[in-house]
Structure formats: structure tokens, C-alpha cells
Image (spheres, rainbow, N blue to C red):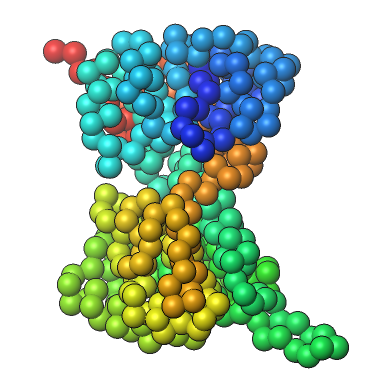
Amino acid sequence: TTVGVPRESGADERRVALVPKVVEKLRTRGVEVVVESGAGLGALIPDELYVAAGATIGDPWSADVVVKVAPPSTEEIGRLRSGATLIGFLAPRTAPESLAALKAAGVVAFAMESIPRISRAQSMDALSSQGNVAGYKAVLLAAERSTRFFPMLTTAAGTVKPAQALVLGVGVAGLQALATAKRLGARTTGYDVRPEVADQVRSLGAQWLDLGIEAVGEGGYARELTDDERAEQQKRLEEAITGFDVVITTANVPGRKAPTLVTARAVEGMRPGSVVVDMAGESGGNCELTEAGEVIVAHDVTIASPLNLPATMPEHASELYARNVSALLELMLDENGALAPDFDDEVLAQSCVTREVSA
Ligand code: NAD
């Protein structure tokens, strides 16, 4: 089996789908890896390191399997061979048109987003690995924008109180945000509509904010709130948020617009100098005032909505992503290294989003 690693074409995409260490490991499974020249440069990996790991530099698009980070552009879909396999983030719920194009091109496509969140597939869970990077980085951005310290300080010039940080939506990114804010010395609080999260929040030394609204959906995800629940949630959060210096939001419901948790009124109620980092900008934002990809200031509160945070830490984000991709790929290989996906396996069945079904 040959595996191709293209250079990512997105403007700010600095990640790469395979790193040299993982290339070495795939080689032991009988896989040939072809890397496009410069594919690793965004992550500071020169071609020579791929060659030293046993890869060749060449055209990645004619390989049996093409591995990518971001969804392919129309032009990139055009370069894929009919019958080729594609693995990457494919935005299957939000970009149905590119799935249709992949299908028309005869490509067998596996979406990293569609891998089931089950224990057996944890090593392939790229939403989690990249969510960890994003949650960490969001806190650093908040600290950077804040006019106040995170930690408590006792100095000769007086004592500074620790920041109060609130994380709304405590999935993978939210847990990492709580952990990171704690390490910086903030007092932390977590909130979610899935009650099972409460213990995870407490185990990170954070308080659990209970607003009495539960909304557990399918596959371990949250469901969308009803209109009444949403109004109630917004009202209670408006009261709660006043006491926080930093609010990090990560709330998402798969395939839906992100819920509005921080209203304009809530922002008005925050102390000047406070910061909101909205990690849900890509899906419409959790703050009513969010402008996706921008940093704005309203009522002296900074509202930042960074996009693609994992790409801002390309080295570790690529390393973790590459392990996720290779774990999925290895699941498709037989003992001779030939591509032989078993579509009765639920991990492959669910992550495969386009597949030629011959009559
Ligand atoms: P996500 O990015 O889809 O959403 C982030 C968080 O927002 C979730 O915790 C969700 O409950 C919350 N949320 C949604 N609507 C909300 C609202 N109106 N108010 C408050 N919070 C709201 O989530 P994710 O980080 O991708 O995690 C999804 C699930 O996958 C979690 O249950 C996680 O534990 C699970 N998971 C399981 C495994 C495994 O191997 N078993 C591995 C990773 C993740």
C-alpha cells in the first residue's frame, strides 16, 4: 500500500497529516509513504527528516491512500484517483457538497470527525487530540488579553486575588481549558448540560456550576435545548457570569449552530477588562457578540473568537493527529500491509462517509 501526504493548502493550516516518527512505524507494516515536498514545513519538519524515516518525496495524489488534515479543496478532489482512499477531517455534516464531489470522483473517504467516541477508537480520536490543543491555547489567549493576573500574588506591593475562570461546555477542549487555567493559578468553574461531566470537572479541582438543565443527546453528545430551556439557561448564565474575569466557551451540538450561552446582556454585566474566548466561532459562536475569527471589545470586555487553534501549535498538533490517522489506517491493513478495510467493523463503517457501492 502507498500512502500520500500532501502539503496542506489552507492559508493558515500549518499542520501535516503524518510526521516522520509515524512514517517509520507505518514502514514496519509494509506501507510506502510518499510526501509532497514541503508538506511538513509549516510544522518545521524538512523533507530530509521524512526521507530519513524511509519516505520518498514525490506526488502524493497518485497513492492508494491520501492522508490530509483539512477537508480537500475542489481542486484537490480533482487530483484524487478513482478508487483511491482519503482520510482526513472532511466536515461531513457541514460540507455535504464536498462529500458529493468525493463520491462522484469514486473516492472511498473516511472522516476523522465520524469515528465513534468509543474506548476502542480512542487512539484514533482526532477531535479529542485537537480539542486538547485548542483548549490549552484558548486559555493562553485569554491570559494574554486579560488586564488582570490569573494567579494569586502576594507581593511587597500588596496582594492580588486570583482570576475567576468559567468554562462553558466541558467536553475534551473544555476539560483541557479548566486544567490549563488551573495551572496558571485561576479559580476554575465548569458548566455543561451533560450531568456526567460534573465529576470530571471536580476532579480537575474546579467547581461545578449546576443550573438544573440536563440535555443528554445521542452518542455521548449534548442535544439542542428547547426554546424554554434556552431562555432559562441564558437568564441563569447572565447572573452567574457577572462574577467571572475569564469565560471560555466550547459548547457545540454536532451538526447544529452552536448554542448562545453568553448574551450581550451577560457581557454588559462583566467587569471591564474581562475576557471571553469563544471557541465555537466556526459553528456560529457561543457569545451573541462574537465575530468569528475576530477580536472585538464591547463594554470594555474583550471577545476573541480564534479559528483553527490547533494549527497555531503545528508541531504537537501534527504529532498527535498523525498517530490518530495511522491508528485508523492500521485498522484497514491486513497482515501483509495490503488495504483491506472490514466494513463490518463499526469504527470503519461509521467513519467511512463515501464509498462506491457497485451494483
Ligand atoms: P463537543 O465539542 O461536541 O461539545 C463541547 C461540549 O459542549 C460538550 O460537553 C457538550 O455537552 C456541551 N454543550 C452542548 N450544548 C450545550 C449547552 N447548551 N450548554 C452547555 N453545554 C453544552 O464535545 P466533545 O468535546 O467533542 O465531546 C463529546 C463527547 O464525546 C463527550 O461526551 C466526551 O466525553 C465524549 N468522548 C468520549 C471518548 C471515549 O473514548 N469514550 C473520547 C473522547 C470524547
Locate residue 108: give its quadrant.
top left
Q: Can you say whether 72 is above or below 132 in the image?
A: above
Image location of residue 128, percent across then percent down = 49, 49
Q: Can you say whether 308 is above or below 224 in the image?
A: above
Q: Is residue 244 left or right of residue 237?
A: right
The residue depicted at 59 percent of the width and 66 percent of the height is 145
Q: Is residue 158 visible?
A: yes
Image location of residue 173, percent across then percent down = 50, 57
Q: Is residue 28 visible?
A: no
Q: Nearer the viewer, residue 76 or 126?
A: 76
Locate residue 311: give its quadrant.
top right
Quadrant showing the C terminus: top left
The residue depicted at 48 percent of the width and 74 percent of the height is 301
Seen from this angle, which residue lies furthest right?
A: 156
The residue depicted at 71 percent of the width and 82 percent of the height is 152
Total marks shown come to 0
The residue depicted at 30 percent of the width and 78 percent of the height is 234
Q: Is residue 184 left or right of residue 105?
A: right
Seen from this angle, which residue lies furthest bottom?
A: 158
Image location of residue 17, percent across then percent down = 53, 29
Q: Nearer the viewer, residue 346 or 216?
A: 216
Q: Nearer the viewer, residue 46 or 63?
A: 46
Image location of residue 261, percent across then percent down = 34, 71
